[in-house]
Each structure stands twice: as C-alpha cells, then as structure tokens.
Image (spheres, rainbow, N blue to C red):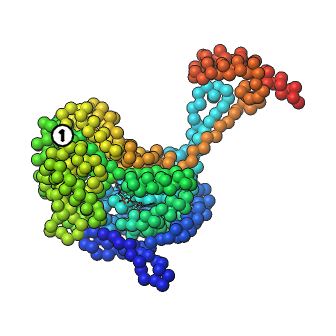
C-alpha cells in the first residue's frame, strides 16, 4: 500500500511519499514528492553534464558500468530484500528475475556497446560506381528520462539507464511511487561506482513528477507502465516532439498442443502465471490447450499450484509473495468475480489468502473460459491462470491473436516445425517455443510489443539504437566533375534523367553501363556551360 501524504510544514510544501511493505503494512521508508521546479532543475543539470559525458570514451563508460556491477554484487542481499520489502515479491525471485539478469545486461552492454554503435559503411549500390561512399555514425541524444512501473523496480530502470549511459546519454529516472526507495538505491549505486555528479539522477514522486519530467522536454522518454498512462505521455511528449519508447501492458497467451511435454508445460504455466504474483507484463494471462489434452494438463496445473507456498517475501521457502497494491488486488478480485458470473469454474484459489494479513491473493486456476469473458480481454496483472481450449492450429492462432495486446506469447509442442510456424503467426514482440516469460532477462535481444503493448524497443541492438541519433556521412570521391542532375536543365539533361529512371534505378549494372554515353554527353554539356559562365 502507498499513500502520498503531506508532511507538516509552514509553507505546505515538502509533500512526501510513504512506502509500505505490502506483506506487512510496515513503513519501509519515505521519499520526497518532487515538484516541477525540482524536475526542471534536474533536467538542466543533466543537460549541463551531458557535454562532458558524451565525449567520455567507451572504455571509461564501460569501466564505470563494470564498477557499478561490483557495487551491486557487494550489496546484493540488501538490495534483494529492499526490492522484496517494497514490492512484496520473494527476495530470491528478486535475485533471479531482477538482479542476475540486469548484471548480465550490464556486462554485455559495457563490453559491446562500442562495437554495436561502431561507425560502419553502408552499401549504396550503383552510387558507389559514381564514386560515392556512405557511412553511419551514431551520436548520443542528450538527456534520457526514464519512467518505470513498480513490478520490476530495479532491473527495468537500471537496465535502460546502463544502455542510455553506454550510448553517451545522461539520465533522469522517475521511479514508481510504489517503489521509490528502490529507485533511490539505483542512484546510490551509480554514485558509489564513481559516475560523475548528475550523470544519473533520481527524482521521486507520483504521476505528477512523471508528467513534469515529460514536460521538461528531455531528448527521449523511456516509459514502462499502463496503456492509459502511455497515451497521456505520448500526447504530452508530442508538444515538444520528444520521442518516446512505450513498454505497455500485456495479455500474453500460452498455446499448448497435445503433443507437448505436458509435465513441463504445466510447470511453465504455473511459473509463467504466478511468479511475481502474476504482476509481470509478460505473465501468462491466457492458456489455450488442445481439447484432447485439457483434462491432463489442468489436473497437473491444479496439483502443482496447490503445492506452492505463499508467504512474506523475506523467506527462502516463499514461492508466491504479496501483491504490490490494494488497487491491484481489487482488479484481480473483479476479474475473478466476472469469470464466476460468466460461468467459468474456479479450480483452486479465487480469494485473498485468509491465513495472511497483507495483500496476498491465492494463485487461481480457472477453467471453462472463453475470449468473451472480461478476464480474457483486459490485463489482470495478478495470480490468475484462465484456461480455454482449441481444436485446430488455426483456431489456436486466432484465439491468441484476438487481443488488443501483443507483448509475448509461448507455443508448446514437440514438433519443431509446427512450433516455429505457429510462433511466426502470433502478433507479439517476443514469442517462445517451449519456453515462457523470461526473455526480458536476455538483454541481448529486443524487447517490446505489437499493438497496444507498446512502441519501440528496449534491449538488444534495436533498443540501443533507440538511444542514439544516426548520422549519415556521404562522401563524393570524384569531386572534380559536376553532377549530371545539377542545373542548368536541358533536353540532354532530361534524356539523361529518363535514363536514370529506366536504367540506373533498375539497380542493374549492365543496364547502367548502357547509360554511360548519355551521361558523358551530359557532363560535357555541363563543363561547357561552366566554361561559358566564367
Ligand atoms: P502506471 O501507468 O500507473 O505508472 C507507470 C509510471 O508512470 C509510474 O512511475 C507513474 O508514477 C508514472 N506516471 C503516472 N502518470 C503519469 C503521467 N501523467 N505522466 C508521466 N508519468 C506518469 O503503471 P503501473 O501500474 O506502475 O505499471 C503496471 C503496468 O506496466 C502494467 O500494464 C504492465 O503490463 C506494464 N509493464 C509493462 C512492461 C513492458 O515491458 N511492456 C514491463 C513492466 C510493466
């Protein structure tokens, strides 16, 4: 639970965010509700230090990022417990799903950003024949504003920050109001690693602080959160033409064919739906199983779900922790009630855990569902696993694609060709075959959504390219002659232009060679015109 409350001051200022542990309701700590003026000042400082940071060598950026890894490793247990305290997730899961993947991302971009952003030549086909060459050079953008959600409060903003820094940008992070202390911890890590002052800054606060960051016109916004907020940010950013990457919601399908290893598919479904209490953008939110396997798969899923231990996140034996906010629990309750009312069957769970005091909702398996039910259409973002059936491959694909979202998906089959064939027909940014959920953890691969799940990419080379400005350098190595397409135009030039359209633009070397006599005629004409005008 989180409250934004006013601390008592004579000016009515110094509003604070109080962060509560959702498992115990105990206060974890407080952070300032920063104002527009605070945010503008942070962005200005960020702009000022960008001038030096952008000329820092890749080797130095890499050294500092590797140093930040050491800082994290040295404080790993403490960081994992802080993540668990603020978000409710088991602290072991914080290590597995946040700290380990982001450490891998850090070493990868520290070691490879220079190569990934290296200057390279571009093949320009027949223009090369005319003595031209082209190169691409990548420049940093400037100040990158990062506005993350609360569900992976460490790995998402930290990973994006490292990529932005390696590309030569400076960063201002506005963490979620549900996890401000994890956000501040990220700032502390960069400071301890020895990054120059203000290269990474953290501004705490709720949506108002986020809106102020967008209005401060940084050079890019990297946003992770709901579709509704994504739309607001896109509209606000448009005022300054600030480019935005939007990582939004999901309603991710898992398709299980009858020939799949059902034991593994059941394990994957349970983990994919219930890890982080189902509060992952790439959680399994819809399971479609081939009719002939539904009974066996459901039986296995229900049995495995009933064995999971739900408890506070600070215990090593906890598999399912608390949910992050009361609001989120209420959404889950609404969706489960809707399933019930629509005739679906709750196989296990379907209620708050009566034995625990905090925000614990039991992992819930639901059968007899279909795509008309609300819980199959809207993002639930909680520990629910609704199961529906299909009879043909085409039907499975149609059901999976019947959604406004398209973040990730998974296909389960022993037939490799079928797996790939189906995967490519799913409208989602990442599709796994016989794997589930975890690909955000592979920093080397692009991450992002189709449809309402987002715009742009984070991670991978594609994500790195979101954080730079490409510059094309074009060189004429034969600059002794005028260009055939320059002034003055004449009947000879127009004939040459016809040749460009029919021959040169065909991309064929043989056809272009046939244009040469006409080209020489035109160049001769231009040289004569130059002489006359002297
Ligand atoms: P949210 O949209 O409520 O908030 C996200 C962030 O935006 C917070 O930091 C918030 O303070 C800030 N914010 C709110 N209003 C703002 C405004 N007007 N201007 C600027 N910033 C503003 O989302 P949430 O509840 O924190 O996160 C849950 C959502 O995030 C889910 O839909 C989930 O699927 C999505 N998510 C997506 C990904 C992905 O990679 N696609 C990853 C994690 C979470």
Q: Which residue is drawn at 83% across and 23% down?
A: 528
Tell how many labels.
Answer: 1
In the image shown, does 292 or 340 lie closer to the viewer?
A: 340
* Helix, strand or loop status at disc 1: strand
Residue 290: % across, % down? 17, 37
Residue 338: % across, % down? 20, 53
Residue 252 visible to an observer of this rendering: yes
Q: Is residue 108 left or right of residue 527?
A: left
The residue at the far front in this view is 341
In the rendered image, the quadrant that contains the N terminus is bottom left
Q: Work out whether 312 lies above or below 350.
A: below
In the rendered image, the quadrant that contains the C terminus is top right
Which quarter of the frame holds ligand 1?
A: bottom left
Residue 252: % across, % down? 29, 46
Q: Residue at x 59, y 41 (%)?
A: 136
Quadrant in the picture for residue 186: bottom left
Residue 510: % across, % down? 60, 16
- Local crowd at mark 1 within 10 Å, few (<14), some, or many (≥20)? many
Q: Work out whether 348 lies above or below 356.
A: above
Quadrant in the picture for residue 178: bottom left
The residue at the far bottom in this view is 10
Q: Residue at x 24, y 43 (%)?
A: 371
Residue at disc 1, CB closer than 8 Å to ligand 1: no
Residue for badge 1: 389
Q: Residue at x 18, y 40 (%)?
A: 389
Residue 189 visible to an observer of this rendering: no
Q: Is residue 150 left or right of residue 174?
A: left
């Amino acid at each position: 639970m989180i409250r934004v409350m006013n601390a008592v001051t004579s000016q009515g200022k110094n509003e604070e965010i109080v962060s509560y542990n959702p498992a115990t309701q105990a206060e974890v700590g407080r952070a300032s509700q920063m104002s527009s003026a605070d945010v503008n000042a942070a962005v200005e400082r960020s702009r000022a230090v960008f001038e030096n940071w952008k000329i820092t060598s890749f080797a130095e950026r890499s050294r500092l990022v590797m140093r930040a890894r050491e800082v994290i490793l040295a404080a790993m247990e403490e960081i994992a417990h802080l993540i668990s305290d603020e978000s409710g997730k088991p602290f072991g899961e914080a290590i597995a799903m946040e700290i380990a993947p982001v450490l891998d991302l850090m070493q990868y971009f520290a070691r490879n950003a220079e190569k990934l952003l290296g200057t390279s030549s571009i093949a320009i086909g027949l223009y090369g024949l005319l003595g031209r060459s082209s190169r691409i050079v990548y420049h940093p953008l400037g100040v990158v504003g990062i506005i993350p959600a609360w569900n992976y409060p460490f790995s998402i903003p930290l990973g994006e920050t490292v990529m932005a820094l390696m590309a030569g940008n400076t960063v201002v992070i506005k963490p979620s109001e549900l996890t401000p202390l994890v956000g501040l911890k990220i700032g502390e890590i960069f400071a301890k690693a020895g990054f120059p002052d203000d290269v990474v800054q953290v501004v705490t606060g709720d949506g108002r602080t986020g809106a102020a960051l967008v209005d401060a016109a940084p050079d890019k916004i990297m946003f992770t959160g709901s579709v509704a907020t994504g739309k607001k940010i896109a509209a606000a950013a448009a005022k300054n033409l600030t480019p935005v990457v939007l990582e939004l919601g999901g309603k991710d399908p898992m398709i299980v064919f009858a020939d799949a290893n059902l034991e593994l598919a059941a394990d994957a479904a349970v983990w994919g739906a219930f890890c982080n209490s189902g509060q992952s953008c790439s959680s399994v939110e819809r399971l479609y199983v081939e009719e002939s396997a539904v009974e066996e798969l459901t039986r296995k899923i229900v049995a495995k779900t009933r064995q999971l231990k739900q408890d506070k996140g600070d215990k090593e034996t906890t598999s399912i922790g608390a949910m992050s906010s009361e609001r989120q629990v209420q959404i889950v309750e609404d969706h489960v009630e809707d399933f019930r009312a629509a005739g679906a069957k709750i196989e296990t769970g379907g209620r708050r855990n009566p034995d625990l005091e905090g925000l614990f909702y039991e992992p819930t398996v639901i059968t007899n569902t279909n795509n008309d039910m609300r819980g199959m259409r809207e993002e639930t973002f909680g520990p629910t696993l609704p199961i529906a059936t299909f009879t043909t491959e085409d039907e499975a694909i149609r059901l999976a694609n019947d959604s406004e979202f398209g973040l990730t998906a998974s296909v389960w089959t022993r037939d490799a060709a079928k797996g790939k064939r189906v995967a490519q027909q799913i409208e989602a940014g990442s599709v796994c075959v016989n794997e589930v959920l975890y690909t955000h953890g592979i920093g080397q691969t692009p991450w992002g959504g189709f449809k309402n799940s987002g715009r742009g990419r984070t991670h991978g080379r594609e994500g790195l390219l979101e954080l730079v400005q490409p510059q094309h350098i074009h060189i004429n190595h034969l600059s002794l002659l005028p260009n055939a397409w320059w002034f003055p135009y004449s009947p000879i030039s127009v004939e040459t232009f016809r040749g460009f359209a029919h021959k040169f633009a065909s991309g064929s070397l043989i056809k272009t060679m046939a244009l040469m006599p006409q080209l020489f005629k035109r160049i001769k004409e231009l040289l004569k015109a130059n002489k006359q005008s002297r």
